[in-house]
Structure formats: structure tokens, C-alpha cells
Amino acid sequence: MILSSPIEFQWDKGNIDKNLKGHDVANEEIEEVFFGHRIKVVKDMFHSGKEERYLLIGKTLFDRVLFIVFTLRNNKVRVISASDLNKKEEGLYL
């Protein structure tokens, strides 16, 4: 999957700062990952029910590796979840 350029994000009351509270990941860090050089994006085959969801793994500017779940709505990226990459997910990024 190729993201269109420029990438726009949809932050609203349903998802703004949600990952900061739950996983200590700021919205700005999440956005950084989408512009990284070595990102991996795959379709989330298990959770794409009503809308297609995607998994993205990549690094922030400070080399923090994040695991991000997102969807596309109205040509904008809507982040569903973002957290540090865990040991189980590391094999997906290497």
C-alpha cells in the first residue's frame, strides 16, 4: 500500500492524545513515523471488518520504534492505536 502525498492526519476528540494517555506516545511522534525512511506497512487482515485497517512499524526521529494501527478516512490517516514495538512484534520489523 502506498500512502498518498502529502499525508494528512485526522485528529479529533475520538483519538487525539488517546495514545499519549494509554501508551505514552504523542501525536507528533506518531506522525514522524509515517515520514520515516524504513517503514513497513501491511494490511491488517484480522481486523479489517467495516473498514480496512493497516499496520505500520517504523522509527521516530529519536529511534523509538512504534507499532501503529491506522485506517484511511476521507483520504486522511486516522490512527487507531500506537505503542512501542514489543518483543513479539520485533520479527515483523527486522
Image (cartoon, rainbow, N blue to C red):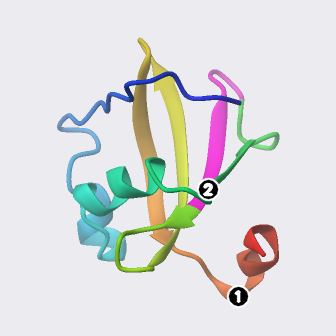
Q: Residue at x 44, y 57 (%)?
A: 33
Q: Which residue is mark 1?
A: 87
Indicate whether residue 54 is drawn in magenta: yes
The quarter of the image holding the C terminus is bottom right
Which range is magenta? 49-57
In the rendered structure, the answer to whether residue 90 lies left or right of residue 29 reads right
Above-or-below relation of 5 to 67: above
Residue sitting nearer the eye, 82 or 4: 4
The quarter of the image holding the N terminus is top right
Horizontal and vertical percent for residue 54?
65, 40
Q: Amino acid at mark 1?
A: Lys
Q: Amino acid at mark 2?
A: Ile
- Residue 42 image-quadrant placement: top right
Mark-to-mark CA distance, 1 and 2: 18 Å
User: What kind of element bears circle 1?
Assistant: helix
Mark 2, residues whose alpha carbon is within 10 Å: few (<14), some, or many (≥20)? some
Dot 1 or dot 2: first in sequence order is 2
